[in-house]
Image (spheres, helix red, strand yellow):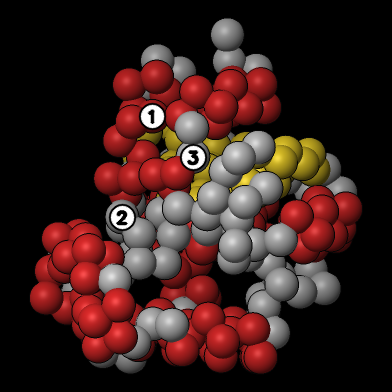
């Protein structure tokens, strides 16, 4: 069976895909790698970046002998998948991104990164702090500032900027109409900049993966990849 790699977002976890595994395993051999710093994976001493995560994905595909790979990435996972396609087009069959933020500026990144303060999250959204600790262990407090640095780096040097036209891989960009982090406008801009892309706007859909209706997403997946 073809290989499908599911990529989680920043501060996310591969378990966000659990409700899709049964349906998708009829069509694919499924891979759910975790980026460094997430889950049980150690946070690298030299920090994290989109480039580092793209390299980790390349290593994962090489180690597992994955070729002609199908990718679906939520949020940051979609960004990494496109960066991988830019560097290794011969190895990518196609990509679906969901809720991926493309419009990174320094100002935007600073604004987003300020929300990643462990003390504020503990005080204001304790249930989210509990989830982060459950998914990433006690190092979640170190992971937050590392992700903030990743965002600031992304704001200064967005790797995909000005390179979309070079990605000829079939891509479906998906965004929820109630996503408060990603705009329909930036998703449309990227869709128009990619030579071989489709665009889907999911109704009544917010940014977090657990707020996406599985039946709606599965129908889009089956349509894009012609699964019957």
Placement of 218 over or under 165, stated as above or below: above
Task: Say which of 59 and 151 sits in front.
Answer: 151
Vertical comparison of 107 with 179: above or below: below
Taking the spot 49% from the left edge, 39% from the top edge, the residue there is 212
Determine whether 197 is above or below 75 in the image: above
Residue drawn at x 51%, y 63% as measured from the top left: 76
Kindly report the distance in space between the C-alpha atoms of the residues bearing marks 1 and 2.
14 Å
Can residue 67 be spotted in the picture?
no
In the image, 159: left or right of 195?
A: left
Residue that numbered label 2 is attached to: 13
Kind of element beneath mark 1: helix
**Tag nearer the camera, 3 or 2:** 3
Q: Which mark is residue 212?
A: 3
Residue that badge 1 annotates: 20
Residue 101 x, y percent position in the rendering:
63, 65
Q: Position of residue 93 (x, y in %)?
A: 62, 37
């Amino acid at each position: 069976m073809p290989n499908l790699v599911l990529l989680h977002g920043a501060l996310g976890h591969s378990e966000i895909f659990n409700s899709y595994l049964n349906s998708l395993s009829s069509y694919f051999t499924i891979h759910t790698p975790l980026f460094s710093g997430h889950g049980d994976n150690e946070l690298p001493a030299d920090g994290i970046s989109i480039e580092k995560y793209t390299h980790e994905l390349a290593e994962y595909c090489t180690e597992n002998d994955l070729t002609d790979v199908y990718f679906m990435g939520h949020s940051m996972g979609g960004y990494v998948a496109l960066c991988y396609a830019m560097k290794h087009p011969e190895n990518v069959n196609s990509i679906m991104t969901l809720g991926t933020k493309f419009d990174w500026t320094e100002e935007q990144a600073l604004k987003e990164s300020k929300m990643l303060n462990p003390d504020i999250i503990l005080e204001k959204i304790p249930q989210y702090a509990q989830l982060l600790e459950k998914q990433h262990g006690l190092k979640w407090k170190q992971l937050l500032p590392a992700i903030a640095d990743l965002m600031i780096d992304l704001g200064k040097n967005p790797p995909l900027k000005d390179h979309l036209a070079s990605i000829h891989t079939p891509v479906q960009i998906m965004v929820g109409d109630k996503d408060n982090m990603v705009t329909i406008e930036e998703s449309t801009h990227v869709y128009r900049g990619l030579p071989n892309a489709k665009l889907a706007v999911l109704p009544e859909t917010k940014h977090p993966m657990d707020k996406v209706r599985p039946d709606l997403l599965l129908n889009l997946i089956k349509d894009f990849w012609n699964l019957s």
